[in-house]
Image (cartoon, rainbow, N blue to C red):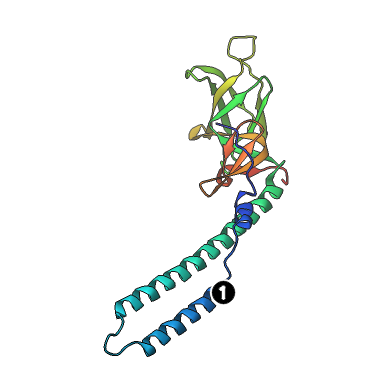
Amino acid sequence: MSEINPVTTTASSTAASTPAVNPESIGQDFDTFLQLLTAQIKNQDPLAPMDSTQFVEQLATFSSLEQQVETNNTLGSIAAMIGDLHSALANDWLGQEVAVASKHVAYEGKPIEFEVNPAFAFDEAVLTVTDTQGNVVWQEALDPEQQRHSWNGSVLNQSTPAGAGVYEFQVDLFSNGQAIASTQAEIVSKITNLANENGQLKLGTNNYLTTDLNSVRKLSDE
């Protein structure tokens, strides 16, 4: 897990700083090129005609350049659209309370609030907390009637709370006495920043979790 830096407007600012080439100017230059080429052909010495291969190569080169410019302009427009989309998402997500599905979470002495994915239908749930060495430090039955739960650092057979560090949460779900799933807890967090990693939007939270839109559930509007 690592905190990410906000770069929500990178795509749009990059597109804005790149000067666009006017397609009409390219079209006019292409027409001028064809006129000059036609004039050369008409006025060439019939006894020593110019190599037609050169004409074809020049035409192909100019046409390729025109297509490349058009492609660059199109990519610039797409980049600007992505930047605008990220800005819109930033306005919609920044500061929102969310539930982030995560196997690991950082404990810093304050209770960690979490929920169980509401998509599961269960009547029993057991939370198991382990440390980085794989030792079980806490285990408890969760009230299936409660939507939100918390772990305050309690440790089995100890009165002293767990030390600061990264812990693993596992929630085992049961229905009618039968195990139905072992799932990640959904850690209650707040979105603090957004980043673009290889074209994919990432959300950063106040408890150092990094996630994408597929692994987060907004709670603020519920």
Residue 6 rendering spot, x and y as whole percentages? 64, 41
Front residue of 215/149: it is 215
Pick the front one: 203 or 146: 203
Q: Residues within 10 Å of mark 1 (few under 14, many from 20)?
A: few
Q: Quadrant of the C terminus?
A: top right
Residue 36 lies left or right of residue 121; in this view the side is left
| Residue 218 x/y as whole percent | 66, 44
Where 53 falls versus 72 (above or below)? below
Residue occupying the point 29% across, 85% down: 49
The residue positioned 57% from the left and 75% from the top of the image is: 24
In the image, residue 36 sits, relative to residue 124, either above or below, namely below
Horizontal placement of 186 versus 64: left or right?
Answer: right
Disc 1 element: helix
Locate residue 162, reporting x and y percent. Answer: 61, 15
**In the figure, 68 relative to 197: above or below?**
below
Q: Amino acid at mark 1?
A: Ser
The number of callouts visible is: 1
Q: Quadrant of the N terminus?
A: top right
The residue where tag 1 is placed is 25
Q: In the figure, residue 217 lies in which quadrant?
A: top right
Residue 145 visible in image: no
From this viewpoint, is residue 157 visible? yes
Residue with the most extreme left position = 47
- Could you say which quadrant of the image residue 159 lies in? top right
**Could you say which quadrant of the image residue 5 lies in?**
top right
Relative image position of residue 141 (x, y in whole percent): 59, 25
Q: Residue at x 31, y 82 (%)?
A: 50
- Depth check: give the residue in front, 186 or 24: 24
